[in-house]
Amino acid sequence: MAMNNPLNKKFSDLAGTMKPSAIRMLLRVTESPDIISFGGGLPNPESFPLEELKEIFEEQLKINGKKMLQYGATEGLKSLNRALAERMRIKEDIDCLPEEILQTTGSQEALYMLGKIFANPGEYVISEAPTYTGTITALRASNINMIGVPMDDDGIIVDELRKTLKDYPDPRFIYVIPNFQNPTGITMSYERRRELLEIASERGIIIIEDDPYGNLRFEGSKIPSIKSMDRDGSVVYLSTFSKVLAPGFRLGYVIATKDIVEKLNLAKQAVDLASSTISEYIAEGYVTKGYMDRQIPKIISLYRHKRDMMIESFEEYFPGDVEYTRPKGGMFTWVTKKGANTDKLFQKAMEMKVAYVVGSAFYFDESNHESMRLNFTYSTDEDIVEGVKRLAEVFRRYT
Ligand SMILES: Cc1ncc(COP(=O)(O)O)c(C=O)c1O
């Protein structure tokens, strides 16, 4: 009797609305070794500093072993927060106290907790459209809606933002990824950053600036972060060790005013008590011993080369009507063919043994079907060329 089956009542309404992340699903499908996958957002394992980590691990274990294996403070290891505050001042022109930093279990946890502390279920936030699919997943898990604002080559279009704010005047925050955005690879111009901050400050709206890729600039000059222009504490800045050390550490950090950090601290106590102390001690060694500063240029040169391989392959093999972004850093490019349906093409691409992430995964309302996200950092050089050839064939045959 299905009606009385207790399993029918097992899950909450919210659990019923949860969907698996498109990317997690895709990673499973594309694990097969004969598929060339541009799908995942994986750093290249060649960029992992194995020797340095071995040295730091041994040293930290010897000096701090007992503390490193114990539960840590919710806000994170003090010496790591101090080192990051110092680094932020020198490298990012962000003035913050160690108490204004909170370590998180990857930025992903920060995104989830920011939804919890700033929005009630059913309320909405504003983001770029497209935006990072993990943020969509994190906010959806708290029943928070996202209103997307279109982008152009300079990032979020602020006139469109103003229009959106007429219809949606009270967003709980505005979420943006200004550097080498995931998924488009686009970088927000300085003027747009300034205007965005002005619009948000005037209306008392919080900006969440998510910056996992800012350190990975291949060319051009650095554009100041929105946080560095923030005078009234309305910007919450997120970053992570995932792309400049390794995602296995699951270590990210939030920089915000003390009252926001305190609320996040309470939320984190409910989620996981504290981040991994092992990760924090190793990350502290990585930053303070100067290894991070030495590693970043190596990662940049590896990824710049791979970006070039991919763009050159596009130029050579893609049909003329396929458009793509030319990211100046980061890990992704965004490919668009007007009139195509990349959700439908995916099956054909899999038959040709090449994978991507469908564009619709990066829209809260899954509205765009003409684009796809390609990762250029993970595949070998040969696979980049071969994978692009196969995708070109998919476009030619099926669109
Ligand atoms: C824009 C953006 N934010 C957050 C994350 C989450 O990173 P992590 O949880 O590994 O720190 C990612 C990962 O790809 C990302 O691209």
Image (cartoon, rainbow, N blue to C red):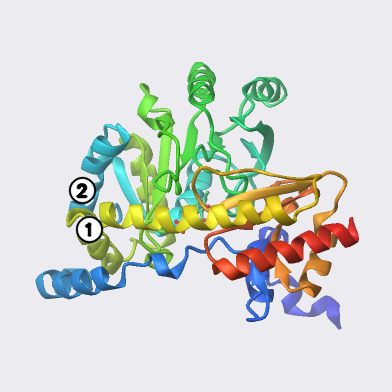
Residue 114 locus on image (x, y percent): 48, 45
Viewport quadrant of the C terminus: bottom right
Q: Dot 2: within a 10 Å radius of its alpha carbon, few (fewer than 14), some, or many (20 or more) residues? A: some
Which circle's residue, 1 or 2, is located before the other in the chain? 2
Residue 325 locus on image (x, y percent): 64, 43
SS for dot 1: helix
Q: Is residue 24 visible?
A: yes
Relative horizontal placement of residue 257, taking residue 363 as reference (left or right): left
Residue at 41% of width from left, 39% of height from top? 237
Q: For the view shown, which residue lies furthest in the top direction? A: 202
293 and 249: which is toward the camera: 293
Instruction: Tell me whether circle 1 and circle 2 mark residues in contact (CB < 8 Å).
Output: yes
Residue at 69% of width from left, 24% of height from top? 160
Residue at 78% of width from left, 67% of height from top? 349
149 and 143: which is toward the camera: 149
Relative horizontal placement of residue 102, taking residue 110 as reference (left or right): left
Q: For the view shown, which residue lies furthest in the front direction? A: 316
SS for dot 2: helix
Q: Is residue 243 visible?
A: no
How many marks do you count on the picture?
A: 2
42 versus 125 height, above or below: below
Residue wearing tag 2: 83
Residue wearing tag 1: 284
Q: CA distance from mark 1 to mark 2?
A: 7 Å
Residue at 73% of width from left, 77% of height from top? 7
